[in-house]
Amino acid sequence: MTADVFGPARLGPVELRNRVIKAATFEGMTPHGLVTDELIEFHLRPARGGVGMTTVAYCATSPEGRTDRHQIWMRPEVLPGLRRLADAVHAEGAAVSAQIGHAGPVANPVSNRLPALGPSRRLSPLGMRMINAASAGDLDRITQAHARAARTARDAGFDAVELHFGHNYLVSSFLSAKLNRRGDRFGGSLTNRARLALDIARAVRGAVGGQLAIIAKLNMDDGVPGGFWLDESIQVARWLEADGSVDALELTAGSSLLNPMYLFTGDAPVREFAAQFPRPARLAIQLAGSRFLRAYPYQEAYLLDRARQFRAALNLPLILLGGITRKQTMDLAMAEGFAFVAMARALLREPGLLHRIRSDPEARSLCIHCNKCMPTIYRGTHCVLASPRTT
């Protein structure tokens, strides 16, 4: 029997009121790395709009793992604010998840004032600094930091954590044969390249297993020649399933380091991104930005064909992401055996979209996939076509 997307559903130890998750979108609302009223309001809007769960992004596990120094990193000082956020979301009837991870080579060493870490030494396009190869000691520290971050989310009253294993952040970069040129037990074979992902998932399960739902956001492919691809990703997913270390996988794609538009599809907002930078960088982005922000045509459920291959190979609950804006697409995902759907841009445009869909199953999202929301991360993420206060 096909599940009802608006019916209650269990995710690990957590009962959600429905099967729609507000996907992680970096909010740009934590100027001192702490929860603000603006961040709470950002997550209250989709909670009031009817989602089953909203995802706070991005909660770095250590200070050098931030993409920007203003991001939250999980430490004792953030606990009161996170608890206030969780209580507010729960009061609206929704659950709340913390996306935890380490940005690795996607971290900005200039902003963080700390060296970026990756599987191998290479030049960072962010500030043109070198990315250092993480030592075995670094990786053990970062693994334990994920466990502590999960415990912080638990102590704050969160319902779930989402482990960021995508977009060529640290774990994803280790999975990529293009980025991982190591000769030790973390490089070479897929077994070795997947070691960090499995170690982190096991550490988090050991820290909070049975108390929080544990989701891994896993790249299906990087969208980069020579990078992580479907056959390897399916095998890693099988290992995670066999371990019992995660309760669900959210399937994603693309590389924030090398090919970000591969995930988003739709228009590439080069001019809008360039406008966020001072003049020398602005001119460079205007001239060369289209080579980095490549345009891919948007279509509804654009990750579905790849995600079907994971559904066929796994019994683990899967979360379908990517261009889900209509009731018909949600129903298709349920019919094909996906446990949940995740939405991001459509809910930025219209946080109350689910209420409208409930009253009119033929309703269509107002999002036009212009992606001009993407550059707004520098001043508070929002849809440029709607007031950020829209409910």
Image (cartoon, rainbow, N blue to C red):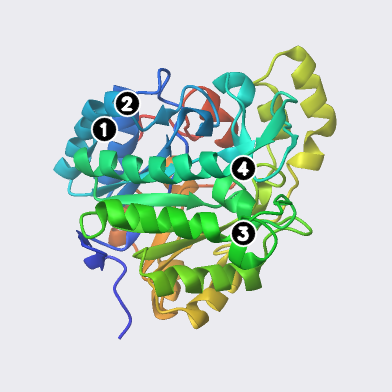
Q: Which residue is mark 3?
A: 193
Q: Position of residue 374 (x, y in %)?
A: 57, 36
Q: Are marks 1 and 2 in contact (CB under 8 Å)?
A: yes
Q: Is residue 229 left or right of residue 33?
A: right
Extreme-bottom residue of the structure: 1
Q: Is residue 175 left or right of residue 327?
A: right
Q: Earlier in the sequence, mark 3 or mark 4?
A: 3
* CA separation in Å, label 1 and label 2: 6 Å
Q: Earlier in the sequence, mark 3 or mark 1?
A: 1
* Rendered residue at 74%/32% (across/down): 125
Q: Position of residue 98 (x, y in %)?
A: 35, 44
Q: Which residue is mark 1?
A: 82
Compared to residue 131, the image places residue 323 above or below, namely: below
Kindly identify the amino acid type of the residue bearing the numbered disc 2.
Val
Compared to residue 206, the image places residue 312 above or below, namely: below
Q: Position of residue 283 (x, y in %)?
A: 81, 21
Q: Which mark is residue 35?
A: 2
Q: Which residue is mark 4?
A: 370
Image quarter (top left, top right, bottom left or bottom right) of the N terminus: bottom left
Kindly identify the amino acid type of the residue bearing the numbered disc 4.
Cys
Q: Position of residue 126 (x, y in %)?
A: 69, 28
